[in-house]
Amino acid sequence: MQGIKLSPGIRYIAMEDEEGPLGVMTLLPSENWPVRVVSIESREDFKYWFNQFSTFENRSDVRNQVSE
């Protein structure tokens, strides 16, 4: 297994099983959102969840800046 930091709040762990490559993507918790973990089984899964997590992370960052 190899962990990769994709952004300040997004991590990806690459793995492999008998059916081929797979992974786990995690959106780390903060004061504005709970932890979220999804299974990645394809390149399309990776792109979809990275975009979802990035969008959520970016919206949360904007809210943090406004409230400070």
Image (cartoon, rainbow, N blue to C red):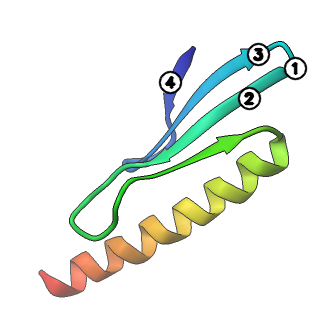
In the image, residue 51 lies at what x, y percent? 64, 61
Residue at horizontal 59 percent and vertical 36 percent from the top: 24
- Asked if the residues shown at circle 1 and circle 4 are in contact, with their CB atoms under 8 angstroms apart, the answer is no
- Asked if the residues shown at circle 3 and circle 2 are in contact, with their CB atoms under 8 angstroms apart, the answer is yes
| Residue that mark 2 sits on | 22
Secondary structure of residue under mark 1: loop
Q: Quadrant of the C terminus?
A: bottom left
Tell me which label, 4 or 3, sits earlier in the chain: 4
Q: Amino acid at mark 3?
A: Asp
Residue at horizontal 29 percent and vertical 82 percent from the top: 63
| Residue that mark 4 sits on | 3
Residue depth check, mark 1 versus mark 2: number of the one nearer the observer: 1
Secondary structure of residue under mark 2: strand
Secondary structure of residue under mark 4: strand
| Residue that mark 1 sits on | 19
Instruction: State how many labels appear.
Output: 4
Residue at horizontal 73 percent and vertical 58 percent from the top: 48
Calculate the distance from the C-alpha at mark 3 to the C-alpha at mark 1: 5 Å
- Binning the other alpha carbons within 10 Å of mark 2 as few (below 14), some (14 to 19) or many (20 upward) gives some
Identify the mark at residue 17; answer none if there is no mark: 3
- Asked if the residues shown at circle 1 and circle 2 are in contact, with their CB atoms under 8 angstroms apart, the answer is yes
In the image, residue 39 lies at what x, y percent? 66, 42
Q: Amino acid at mark 2?
A: Leu
